[in-house]
Image (cartoon, rainbow, N blue to C red):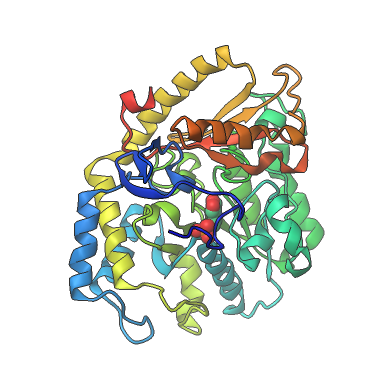
Amino acid sequence: MDPSYLIKPLLDETYPVIDYGKGVYLFDMDGNDYLDGSSGAITANIGHGTKEIIQAAAQQAEKVSFVYRSQFTSEAAEKLALKLAELAKGELNWSFFVNSGSEATETAMKIAIQYWQEQGVFTKTKILSRWISYHGITLGALSMSGHKGRRARFMPLLEDCPVLPPPYCYRCPYDEIEGSCQYSCAHELDLLIKRIGPEHIAAFIAEPIVGAAGAALTPPKDYYKIIKEICKKHGVLFIADEVMTGFGRTGKMFAAEHWDAAPDIVALGKGMGAGYTAIAAALVSDSVMEPILKGSKSIMSGHTLSANPQSCAVSLAVLDYLEKNDLVKQAEKKGIYLINLLRKLQISFPFIGDIRGKGLMIGLEFVQDPTKKTVFPREMLFTQRLISTAQKNGLLLYPAGAGEDGIHGDAIIIAPPLTITEPEMD
Ligand code: PLP
């Protein structure tokens, strides 16, 4: 087998060739097994090789795998849209299906801009976002992403940089004190909107819990309450990027529920197909759809494979499996169990500076000196070495990019499939 395809992260390295997966384990062709401690890129939420999903995929393939969305709808797509409306709280009742998280965040961004245009407002085109964030790799999504390393090569092609600081409590730049936090980072949004002018701003996008760029940065209690109030005051839509946090990962179906953040649009991906298919969606509220339904009656976006029945049927089976096995509740319980294990580990390994997150989305940030929170020198490649050592020992972990700007520490995400058992976590 020639493994020299371009998708390899490092083209001159060899990677193990995976033969099959079962539960929380992956097995390579050389007979090694790996505990999938990060569900790949926080994607394989129900584990590998699940029979029910394989059967649902085969059943749909027997009927029809593809119809073009401009010509037909399908039972699977319609059922999936209804299912998402049922799972999402409040008035999030409309689904636009795409194939990746990046497409989902870009669709959300486009719908936000269209929402204002349908009301005759053509100046509200900017989407505000935060540093230490990741919303996807395509140019629109990357424009909104506060991820220095992934932006660097394409800076001339990107829109303005993200400007808002994230809620990064472990390294709070405002020296806020836990328990009496004044939420300076959230209030910055108010200043920012006033400076730019609300007449230019369509929406603010944020990951409820920051993933790839920040290793599960989790906001304090009232953060999203303040963000929502500021958005409402200025007529700015709130987009929750739940591509990583959605579908039970954090112990709620959607992470915004932890703070009653009631987004206007939600971007979904990863766990929606749980790695069994490529599917993602923008979930849109009734009030955002209202002017569109009264106006052009069409969303100006779409992809060839949007809403293909094959992916929709697989996603439906994944969501069904999630519900039948009560995995959302279990993620909450198992998260507490795993965090407690990690806290014990922290006593023996003081370089684990911070343990954070919710449910089974757990971030670890590493420091040279836990009191001063000093970061390891970049040239030590701490995260890369830790991850590759873990992999050689049969454990997969996800590198989180907070270290790239030299300000923040090395970090990883631990996010096993929600089906993991206590002995497996041990
Ligand atoms: N949004 C968030 C929060 C993500 O974590 C990611 C991927 O890591 C994306 C968007 C992009 O998703 P995809 O890689 O499927 O395009």
Q: Nearer the viewer, residue 144 or 369?
A: 369
Q: Residue at x 50, y 37 (%)?
A: 397
Where does the image place residue 143, in percent across and percent down from the top left?
A: 68, 62
Q: Residue at x 66, y 34 (%)?
A: 410
Q: Is residue 72 above or below residue 376?
A: below
Q: Nearer the viewer, residue 403 or 143?
A: 403
Can the viewer see residue 235? Answer: no
Of all residues, the one furthest to the front in this rendering is: 1
Of all residues, the one furthest to the right in this rendering is: 195
Compared across the picture, whether 248 is left or right of 193 comes to left
Where does the image place residue 323, in percent across and percent down from the top left?
A: 26, 46
Q: Quadrant of residue 286?
A: bottom left
Q: Is residue 366 above or below residue 161?
A: above
Q: Quadrant of residue 278?
A: bottom left
Figure quadrant of the C terminus: top left
Q: Nearer the viewer, residue 343 or 295?
A: 343
Q: Residue at x 74, y 61 (%)?
A: 153
Compared across the picture, whether 361 is left or right of 212 comes to left
Q: Is residue 28 above or below residue 136?
A: above
Q: Nearer the viewer, residue 141 or 177?
A: 141
Where does the image place residue 43, in percent across and percent down from the top left?
A: 43, 49
